[in-house]
Image (spheres, helix red, strand yellow):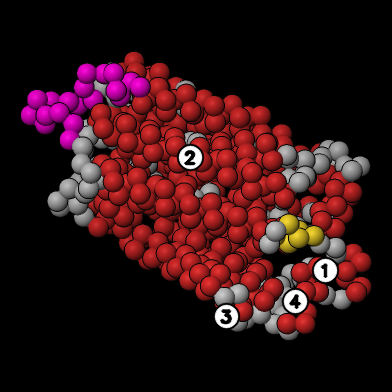
Amino acid sequence: MALNMSHNPEKQTENAIYGKHGSDEESQTRRTSVIGDVVVDRATIGKQLELEAESAIKYRTCSWQKTAALLFSEYICLAIMSFPWAYSVLGLVPGLILTVFVALVVLYTSLTIWRFCLRHPEIRDVCDIGQYLFWDSKIAWWATAVMFLLNNTFIQGLHCLVGAEYLNTMTGHATCTIVFSCVVPIISFFFSLPRTFSGLSHMATVSAFFTFISVLLATIFAGIEPHPADYTEELGKPIVTAFPVSGTTFVSGMSAFLNISYTFIGQIILPSFIAEMKEPEDFWKSVTAVTIAEVIVFSIVGAVIYAYTGNQYMTAPAFGSLGDDLYKKVAFSFMIPTLIFLGVLYASVSARFVFLQFFDGTRHKTQHTVVGWASWAGILAVLWILAFIIAEIVPFFSDLESIMSSLFDSFFGFIFWGVAYLRMRAEDHGSSFYKERGIRGWIGVIVNVFLIAIGFYFLGAGTYASIESVVLSYNEGGFGGPFSCANNGL
């Protein structure tokens, strides 16, 4: 799967027409088209659709609207309710600036992924991209696969944890938290069973809609209730600051930034979505629409709830800052579809990855066979058991988001896509592309080298801050032990 990095200028025009190989023989089977500066390998996409035509289980069936629904369900999620807390740490002005900045960076890198996948429609997931980017190295593929599966399973675990928080909140801790932590993975297992993203898209639409209602209600309730939770005369009215308060530590500031970044950074599963689109050229419509909605919803929800809750009474997720128990329970309850579906989405992505390693090219992939369905269900069961274990071992919300963001988003949010840009430009224009393309070339290389640098900063400073935050919280007695029955309700 190695990329052709030919630097021969005479081959550049030929490569742009015929794809990554320039021979006449290849040109007959690997025709490409160019839309703007986007190279589209329509021949491979057409062949994939043709091969699936007689299959009982078809994968390339998603429209851009269905893909947008999947993206909305991924991004319009519970993590929105960590934005008020992040703004309380960073201050409102830096918080809003970082929200817009991260959104634009993610949109830019998402479009880079889209361009890369259009050139190489044989790519099925981010692991294939990892191998492509790093000189066809199987080591790169395996390293990417490990991070890919860990990231997705951590997200499943996060939803097991929050599901237990919800059930404890609604029932007043009616039973041991471990029991509640089992409920979400059991329910989610059955919702994970559809084999294609097209089959999940309707659930995704419902999930995104109810999440929007949930955060809208939480925002309204924060504004109309007389006081936030735990209000006292001694602490006074909510304090809202435009900039970080004096004494804000690097650890807390970095944790807040990672929480914002985590909510936006979801590029890890975009190649999987694009691989199941019937017309992947339209992916830009899906990701652009979602980014606009994200910036509006995240900024408004974060700013308004922070304005009515202040620094003293803030919790993460912000449902815990609502003073009226009825308000809290009503708003939190509308989040139920997302508590289930987002974990389902990541479980499906992981299960598809594992399943295809064993059954790609066999009838079990495309036909309804006992072996195929039993294997699919077995993979999902293992993933949800692992997610439950993670939820019990790492029982904290904001710090878990920060750890995931620093360890995985450093690569899948920044480093990979900066490298992808440099590889594509070198493939088209040679290793000195930044000179040949003039100011556009220089700007492109500077921006993408900067993205790679941000990724390494995330990995180093972010991981340090996340681990230090966990250590401090444990020292202060802020968390229970692993597999604890203690109440974690809001």
The mark nearer the N terminus, 1 or 3, is: 1
Magenta span includes 21 = no
Mark 2 or 4 closer to N-term? 4
Q: Residue at x 64, y 75 (%)?
A: 426
Above or below, 388 relative to 229: below
Image x and y of residue 348, in percent: 64, 42
Q: Residue furthest top?
A: 326
Q: Are marks 2 and 4 in contact (CB under 8 Å)?
A: no
The residue range painted magenta reads 220-239
Residue at the spot of label 2: 294
Nearer to us in this view, 94 or 273: 94
Up/down of 365 relative to 224, above or below: below
Q: Say few, some or many: other residues with alpha carbon within 10 Å of mark 2 (under 14 / 14 to 19 / 20 or more).
A: many
The residue under the point 51% across, 41% down is 292
The local secondary structure at tag 2 comes to helix
**Label 3, on which residue?**
435
Tag 4 residue: 12
Quadrant in the rendering for residue 395: top left
**Callout 4, which amino acid?**
Gln
| SS under mark 1 | helix
How many numbered circles does the render carry?
Answer: 4
> Callout 3, which amino acid?
Lys
The reply to whether dot 4 and dot 3 touch (C-beta < 8 Å) is no
Disc 4 to disc 3, C-alpha distance: 15 Å
Tell me if residue 456 can be seen.
yes
Q: Position of residue 375 (x, y in %)?
A: 73, 44
Q: Which residue is mark 1?
A: 18
